Amino acid sequence: MQTHFDLIVVGGGIMGTFHAYHAARRNKSVLLLEKDNFPVGATVRNFGQVVPSGLAGRWFNYGQRSLELYGELQAKTDLTFRKNGSVYIASDADEWQLANELYDYYQKVNYPCELLSRETCLEKYPYLQKSYPVGAIFFPNEFTVDSPLLMQRFLGYCVEQAGVTYLNNANVMECQTTNDKVQVRLTNRQQFEAEKVLICNGHEFRMLYPDLFAQSGLVVSKLQMLQTVQFPELTMKGNLLTGLTIRRYESFQQLPSYANLTTPAHYEELKKWGIHILFKQAVDGSIVMGDSHEYAGAQHVNDLGYHINDYINQLMIEEAKRIVDLPVERIQSSWAGFYSQTTDEIYEYDIDENIRIITGIGGKGMTSSGGYSEETIAAYI
């Protein structure tokens, strides 16, 4: 195995893998290092929804580009992407007003969408509770994906087709520039050298530069998610997002009426736990739903714990039952996921001119990493 590369990427989640992929496409020699046997972080613990419609500013643009990249990749190999669109169901007048304003905004920037009446919602999504929808906004070009399978296949594609060298169980303990080359040392004493290193470490703040991360202002979000038993008789196409999502996502926050949005009494306890309800049907017919949000600073990640709070799960199940007429209480599994975020959109820090840290993308990773990393690689190498 060669030991010198143009680029070493530390972290094999969606962010790190896309950086490796784009560098390899530019004919650079790339080593991708993953600390675990398989990526187990935020990349594989999310909904698997690619929804630029929920983003704002440059992240919306990155999301659009990511849709194109995912489409190109899916045409070459099955990464489980399904172009079934996203729908945001408004449940009251305030949410419906925001849906209409978002429709007007996206009409101006030529991002395809359409408004759905209450009657159309109930016809198109017959599993909705009849009392829930006021109307909806639908985005036909967005994707659903099964995240763990995506990463397995994307990593395989990068190795077999793009020429990336991938090493798992590769825990990096030291990264240092010497004589304008970066020396990377693993805990098993393996050493590699590169012209440039990108560290896409997610919420792993203990191994490399712990003092830097302690002062970084980075915050870790713990989320809880649920998966029902299989419902083989059900067909739920695409991403189903709800009124709570309308109240949370960035794209709605930029709209005129958002500043006047009030919180109904029945949302108060959900808001306390950062809950908004999304649904996605997995390939096996089960429903993935959630999620919640609890927060801790980078130096206090362990305070969040890895336990599952049953009270939060029950809050999510009860709200889900208010939205859909399905036996969503029939849960087969539940898990906690973690991702890092920052108030500055993303954390980018140059240790020196050859070593850069990129993390803290928050909940935008699956949707926008493709476009963002393409731009980063073009400027960095």
Image (cartoon, helix red, strand yellow):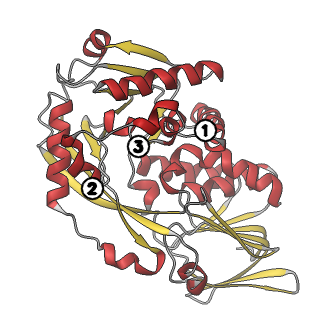
Contact between labelled residues 2 and 3, with CB atoms less than 8 Å apart: no
Give how far across and how far down residue 150 sits, in percent. 48, 46
Q: Which residue is mark 1?
A: 60
Q: Which residue is mark 2?
A: 272
Contact between labelled residues 3 and 1, with CB atoms less than 8 Å apart: no
Locate residue 377: give its quadrant.
bottom right
Q: Amino acid at mark 3?
A: Arg
Q: Earlier in the sequence, mark 1 or mark 2?
A: 1
Q: Amino acid at mark 1?
A: Phe
SS for callout 2: helix
Q: Which residue is mark 3?
A: 248
Screen quadrant of the C terminus: bottom right
Q: Could you tell whether 210 is left or right of 175 in the image?
A: left
Q: Could you tell whether 125 is left or right of 100 in the image?
A: left
Give how far across and how far down residue 2 sits, in percent. 74, 74
Give how far across and how far down residue 35 sits, in percent. 51, 73
Q: Against 197, is 237 above or below? A: above
